[in-house]
Image: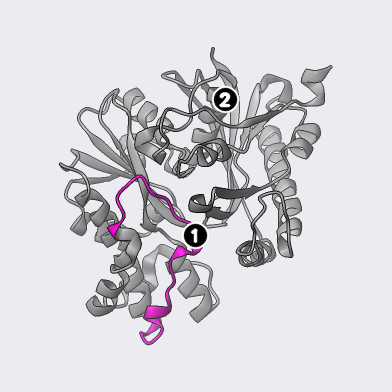
Amino acid sequence: MTLRAIGLMSGTSMDGVDVALLDTDGEARLVFGPTGFFPYSEADRDLLRAALADATRLADREARPGAVGAAERLITERHAQAVESFLRDEKLDPAAVDIIGFHGQTVLHRPERRLTVQIGDAKTLAERLGVDVTFDFRADDVAAGGEGAPLVPAYHRALVAASGIAGPAAVINIGGVANVTFVDGAAEPVAFDTGPGNALIDDVMLARTGQPVDRDGATAAKGRVDEAVLQSLLLHPYFQKTYPKSLDRNDFSFHLTNKLSVEDAAATLTAFTAASLALAFGQRPSAPARAIICGGGVHNPTLMGELARRLPCPVATAAEVGWMGDAIEAQAFAFLAVRVLNGLPLTFPGTTGVSAPTKGGRIVRSDRTMR
């Protein structure tokens, strides 16, 4: 059954809320609607960073210690504002939307402890917007022994098929954490987190310059990759693990670059993101025909140059194959929301290591649908 869905995404880069409208059956049909982006303020990001720090001591996924409770209220409010602005800007009636896919904000991801925490109050969101909301997409997979991430591969496979892209392809998303989906026709996709995406680059820029990002990769472009530090970074035990595997945003640190200039640190961490992706390709028996890059990292020319040099296949941006690269994860949660409603699995053995295709997600009904 084809439904009209809004997908929402606030990723590990913590830059804002992506919104996307999609008409889909959660399988093959994809009719793309408008998209939007609603940035967080610096004060918002400060609170989210504090919540990440306080979440490290979580043992109960329902607990909200320290800044985590305030951050949950903030996330709910900013997502509600984003949807209200999006509906107003696009002159859309909420009654025309069947479902909202609300990922929330990940503050802790520890699948080895059967623990993954995404903050955001779906009930409040549904009541305020008057639209049913799906949420808590990862928990069932983690409870069943899966990694709970990445969640987007089912959409990547549908997107590749709908685009008529021939031959095996790799879809790379570079947010705070980077992940890859290997797609080959109708076969079950293979996917896993590959290592840091933009997070370490953002963190070192904030710590050393007060700026939250390396805009256009300009700082890294002025620096030199320190090969000794890069090789030390690549010794992290995560890279010896076989997939499926997944990461928390804070699994890596930039401390090995502390003695480098800010330019060399940015260059080395940019190379680290690309090199860790190259290692991921080395875990597959053969290289795909092409790699398609989406997410915030696609806007960093220095990173794109490193990827072109290090990956074993041609590299294209999402825009170059006709995709809305910045909106893909939001579109994915619209797609996954419809899969929840249609009773379709969200995760697979090849994407999270779960033993069988696994359904997931919860649904909160709005006052509109309960009347």
Vertical placement of 123 versus 308: above or below? above
Query: Crowding at label 2, few (<14), some or many (≥20) Cα neighbours within 10 Å?
Result: many
User: Seen from this angle, which residue lies furthest bottom?
Assistant: 259
* Residue 353 % position (x, y): 39, 39
Residue 214 visible in the picture? no
For label 1, the residue is: 249
* Residue 218 % position (x, y): 38, 70
Vertical placement of 345 versus 214: above or below? above
Vertical placement of 355 versus 314: above or below? above
Q: Secondary structure at mark 1?
A: helix
What amino acid is at disc 1? Arg
Membership of 259 in magenta stretch: yes
Q: Secondary structure at mark 2?
A: helix
**Magenta segment, which residues?**
240-261
**Residue pictured at 35% horizontal, 70% vertical:** 269
For label 2, the residue is: 340
Residue 302 lies in what quarter of the image?
bottom left
Query: Crowding at label 1, few (<14), some or many (≥20) Cα neighbours within 10 Å?
Result: many
Horizontal arrangement in the rendering, residue 42 relative to residue 173 (left or right) = right
